[in-house]
């Protein structure tokens, strides 16, 4: 008499997916750790590099301060962790791609892989734009308008929170062309509709800039104008792709 299969002997695709997800999460954490530990040796130099835009704008004789006893250690530690995640982002997204790609169609894989690479490059571009363009202008303005007799001495922990917020804001804002391509490709909107709504998009860029940046017109404009230009670039690319698809059909 043959043995019957019990429920435990039957295939369990959900369990297999959970195991694969666990393995990929472990690989992601390992990738971050492999970047973090060598980088932590240079954590102090790394913070000095991030603080350079503000340090160059501070008046002579002033410096940054640490108001918490643990800040000199914890702040560079946090910054190193953030930078490790940022540098390991290609590996992290590769693990995410390996998990979701089996469920995609062939034409979706062909379209999604360039978008994945482009999104990484655009996020890095947003971070670089914030560091090299926005920070010198922003900190130069803030230190210049300080009242007479007021010494500008920023706490290192608050400075880190401030710059990380701006890094994320500009990195996410630079993903706008990818968002436009996905919306047009999925049929949520059309290129013609986006062109008709251009005036509202420009106003929306300034509103988003107001919400994501500090309450000053300079940082708001420095975020809103690139977002508008990236919107125009996304519309142009989506229009070109649609025209190519029509020619192929």
Image: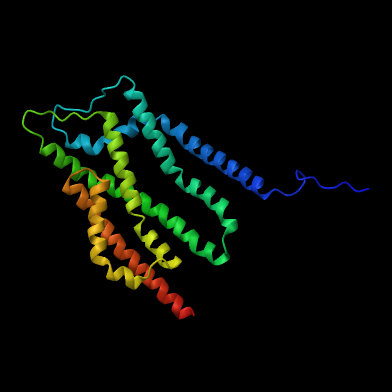
The location of residue 47, given as percent across then percent down, is 32, 33
The location of residue 123, given as percent across then percent down, is 37, 51
| Left or right position of 200 against 152 | right
The correct choice, above or below, for 97 with respect to 34 in the image is below
The location of residue 178, given as percent across then percent down, is 39, 59
Determine if residue 71 is in view.
yes
Q: Quadrant of residue 165?
A: top left
| Left or right position of 18 against 53 | right
Q: Looking at the picture, tell me which residue is in the foreground, 58 or 78.
A: 78
- Farthest residue in the top direction? 69
| Left or right position of 3 against 85 | right
Q: Looking at the picture, tell me which residue is in the foreground, 3 or 51.
A: 3
Q: Quadrant of residue 139?
A: top left
Determine if residue 49 is in view.
no
* Residue under the image location 11 percent in, 38 percent down: 144
* Residue under the image location 49 percent in, 59 percent down: 113
The location of residue 133, given as percent across then percent down, is 24, 48
């Amino acid at each position: 008499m043959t043995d019957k299969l019990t429920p435990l002997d039957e295939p369990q695709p959900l369990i297999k997916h959970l195991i694969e997800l666990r393995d990929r999460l472990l690989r992601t954490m390992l990738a971050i750790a492999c970047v973090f530990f060598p980088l932590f040796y240079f954590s102090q130099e790394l913070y000095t590099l991030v603080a350079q835009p503000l340090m160059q704008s501070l008046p002579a004789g002033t410096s940054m301060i640490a108001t918490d006893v643990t800040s000199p250690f914890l702040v560079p530690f946090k910054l190193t962790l953030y930078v490790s995640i940022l540098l390991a982002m290609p590996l992290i997204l590769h693990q995410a791609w390996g998990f979701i790609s089996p469920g995609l169609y062939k034409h979706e894989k062909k379209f999604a892989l360039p978008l994945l690479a482009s999104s990484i490059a655009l996020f890095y571009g947003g971070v670089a734009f914030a560091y090299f363009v926005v920070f010198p202008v922003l900190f130069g303005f803030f230190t210049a308008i300080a009242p007479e007799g007021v010494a500008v001495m920023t706490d290192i922990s608050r400075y880190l929170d401030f710059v990380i917020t701006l890094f994320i804001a500009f990195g996410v804002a630079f993903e706008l062309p990818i968002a436009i391509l996905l919306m047009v490709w999925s049929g949520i909107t059309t290129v013609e509709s986006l062109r008709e709504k251009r005036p509202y998009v420009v106003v929306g860029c300034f509103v988003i800039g107001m919400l994501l940046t500090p309450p000053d017109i300079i940082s708001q404009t420095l975020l809103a104008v690139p977002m508008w230009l990236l919107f125009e670039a996304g519309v142009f690319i989506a229009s070109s792709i649609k025209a190519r698809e029509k020619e192929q059909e």
